[in-house]
Image (cartoon, rainbow, N blue to C red):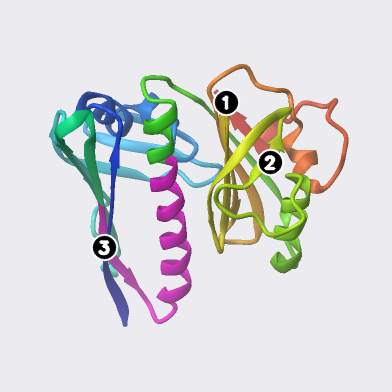
Amino acid sequence: MGHEFEIEQRAEVPASPEEIWAAISTGPGIDSWFMGRNEVADGAVTTVFGDYSPTTRITGAEPGARFAHGTETATDGRFVAYEFLIEAQSGGATLLRAVTSGFLPGDDWQDEFEAMSAGLELFFATLVEYLTHFRGRTATPLTVFGPPVPEWDQAWPSLAKKLGLSHPAKPGDRVRLAGEDGVVYFVNSQNVAVRTPTALYRFIRGFHGPMIASHHLFADDPGVDWKSWLDGQHTSTDRVSGTQATAS
């Protein structure tokens, strides 16, 4: 048994079709809102996110209109396909639609589907945030893996407290992070995301247990030791290094 799915997301953004095209079809553009480090070359999109490094083949590329890529179908039927559709609107806005479809095999597909759906919500919200507030710029992606989280019911309130909140984070909350004032732009059961004037900061519930910092920096690195930050420490003198953090 398995599950065939199709998820459509849409938003009207104050960006031109050319700006959206650069965001969804180039490595630096994808780096600015998706996850990890990305490369678009030789007819494929490759993402490196910790030990996870999938490659998808480009199946459609119409500049300013459509970009599609996906995995090859595995022997058990698993595949995922991504399609972005761009439509110019009156008044300078553009309609962006993202359609993700595929098949998840096995009797335990529900947990994977839930995690994937939550991630897609985060990534699309970040893409919209990028096209609204940082379009035309490119970010340095920063990825840091924290330790396994034993109780997520405690982890999220702890994160909210570090953001200066006395309640669970919700969209629109004003917070303080990395030395800047910011606003929470997205929350779901597995993610919290904050925009500051110079960055998009995201905290993700990893599928196998850790909290992950998956950030996009549009200015100089503020020098926060995100590994210690995720560990619950208060030191910031040591730079994050090794396999725990990647930035380029």
Kind of residue indicated by mark 1: Pro
- The disc label shown at residue 175, or none: 2
Image point (21%, 28%), residue name = 92
Q: Is residue 116 magenta?
A: yes
Q: Amino acid at mark 2?
A: Val
Q: What residue is pinned by disc 1? A: 197
Q: Residue furthest top?
A: 220
- Helix, strand or loop status at disc 2: strand
Q: Position of residue 246 (x, y in %)?
A: 60, 32
Q: As rendered, which of 164 and 157 lies closer to the eye?
A: 164
Residue 26 location in percent, x, y? 31, 27
Q: CA distance from mark 2 to mark 3?
A: 37 Å
Checking the image for residue 102, the label placed there is 3
Q: Which stretch did the figure color magenta? A: 99-126
Tell me the quadrant of the picture where the N terminus can be found. Answer: bottom left
The image quarter containing residue 100 is bottom left
In the picture, residue 156 is in which quadrant? Answer: bottom right
Q: Residues within 10 Å of mark 1 (few under 14, many from 20)?
A: some
Q: Which mark, by number, is residue 4?
A: none
Question: Is 122 left or right of 2, judged from the image as shown?
Answer: right
Residues under labels 2 and 1: Cα distance? Answer: 12 Å
